[in-house]
Amino acid sequence: PALQINNVPVVGFYGLHESDLDKVFQLPTTTFIGGNENSLSLREIIKRLENTYCQHIGLEFMFINDVEQCQWIRQKFETPGVMKFTNEEKRTLLARLVRSMRFEDFLARKWSSEKRFGLEGCEVMIPALKTIIDKSSEMGIEYVIMGMPHRGRLNVLANVIRKELEQIFCQFDPKLEAADEGSGDVKYHLGMYHERINRATNKKITLSLMANPSHLEAVDPVVQGKTKAEQFYRGDTAGKKVMSILLHGDAAFAGQGVVYETFHLSDLPSYTTNGTIHVVVNNQIGFTTDPRMARSSPYPTDVARVVNAPIFHVNADDPEAVMYVCSVAAEWRNTFNKDVVVDLVCYRRRGHNEMDEPMFTQPLMYKQIHKQVPVLKKYADKLIADGTVTLQEFEEEIAKYDRICEEAYTRSKDNKILHIKHWLDSPWPGFFNVDGEPKSMSCPPTGISEDLLTHIGNVASSVPVKDFKIHAGLSRILRARLEMTKNRVVDWALAEYMAFGSFLKEGIHVRLSGQDVERGTF
């Protein structure tokens, strides 16, 4: 249908009038809305720009001080017809939504009075994460390290990491005994490590979800540190094999200082992990606090602007828009090795947890939420209407997953002890036990020979490069250090050097971190 311009003064703001709507204009080289055309009528220009920027995706990228990166984003979103999905892709998306939603429904039916911090209202997060992982695997990623708070954690463990459902369900058993290797922890804090074949790419993928306390964003630098270490030991300096994904809530993302601190490490040479994909579950409320009382910035994601990370806001009730945005985010990270933020604008169908009554504090918001049609029904109705799937196929998909859950629930009732090794977020072979027996935590002997210490002391007192002129003050320190080594005397600085040197002699990597370490101030 022809575009109706209702607000003619807006066109007039640019010195144009209603009579100009059918005039043809040459398109500048900075836009991609023309596709293969070099000129369009003003009416068509406005229509295509509104299709790109005024629908279910909102883009923030004009603050990025790199023309190539801005043009890359424009091309990804402005090119006509970019958001076309095959019927197979739509059916896969529907199946993933079914699993996400029916998992939450199953927990609600079986354990209605248990806290589980369900994902209801943002079920699209599961297919979103799977899209990021699929696209990244396609581009060569072999290991994804993830960190997240508690909302939707059990669903991620079940449907993204692919934890056995019976292992999750038996966590709800009040008679469950903690295994000897560790103390109990609430189920929505637990981590997981899993190797599997990615069905979309037929490539091996390893997924690690880090354990996280109730301190929501505390896991952010932990994930980055683990990712950096994995990249280092694999020789993956460009981050093409190992990557990180961080999930956040909107209130914590804007409110916690560790988020800002971690962002500022993202592009430092000694700390970068070559880009992290951040996914914000923006349910527009923090426990009982409205956004206008929680932050001074318009969006919860504004903290990401400090590192020139593009921000893609997307309506979580439009699964196809979410999938496209997540695919572009994975491509961005692979192309530019920089952070990117996906803001899933959604809602929280229940209270902060399942025991909380939100109508006490947000009655108007929750009257509206109660009227919201679940995203699965919306999307299923759309696909049934356009003939992509039949109602019978949709109902069979639901019945199939319900059956999987019921069978796992039956298995979870077996009389067995849950071992903590099922819930480690990293494989630590030989750390807790050796050959199945608990490992003694006694310290091994760490002493080394005096000859080796003397050798390290001599190296510590010398200049490693020939004909290198060093500062006179530093030269005095090195002479004093050599004298100490000869006299078998050690001060604190030399003792530290000998300790580090003994590691290096055994081929153990030593990383010193902090602003004081170059001078050894303390």
Image: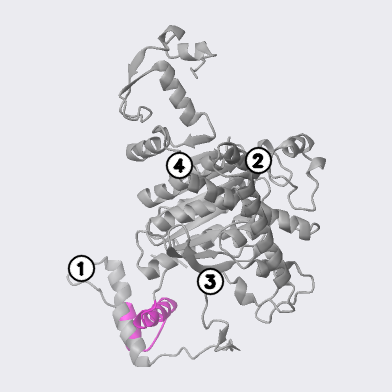
**Dot 1 corresponds to which residue?**
468
Which residue sits at x=36%, y=49%? 335
Q: Is residue 481 left or right of residue 289?
A: left
The answer to whether the residues at label 2 and label 4 have Cβ atoms under 8 Å apart is no
Q: Secondary structure at mark 3?
A: loop
**Dot 4 corresponds to which residue?**
310
Residue type of the residue flagged with mark 3: Ser
**Dot 2 corresponds to which residue?**
284
Q: Secondary structure at mark 1?
A: loop
Q: Main secondary structure of the magenta part?
A: helix
Residue type of the residue flagged with mark 1: Phe
Q: Earlier in the sequence, mark 2 or mark 4?
A: 2
Q: Secondary structure at mark 2?
A: loop
**Dot 3 corresponds to which residue?**
426
Instruction: Kindly give the residue lying farthest to the top in the view shown.
Output: 19
The answer to whether the residues at label 1 and label 4 have Cβ atoms under 8 Å apart is no
Q: Position of residue 497 (x, y in %)?
A: 39, 77
Instruction: Kindly give the residue lying farthest to the left in the view shown.
Output: 467
Q: Earlier in the sequence, mark 2 or mark 3?
A: 2
Asked which quadrant contains residue 186, the reply is bottom right
Q: Earlier in the sequence, mark 2 or mark 1?
A: 2
Residue type of the residue flagged with mark 4: Pro
Q: Nearer the viewer, mark 2 or mark 1?
A: 2
Residue type of the residue flagged with mark 2: Gln
Is the residue 430 above or below the residue 512 in the image?
Answer: below
Q: CA distance from mark 2 to mark 4?
A: 20 Å
Q: Is residue 151 left or right of residue 327?
A: right
Q: Earlier in the sequence, mark 4 or mark 3?
A: 4
Q: Position of residue 488 (x, y in %)?
A: 37, 89
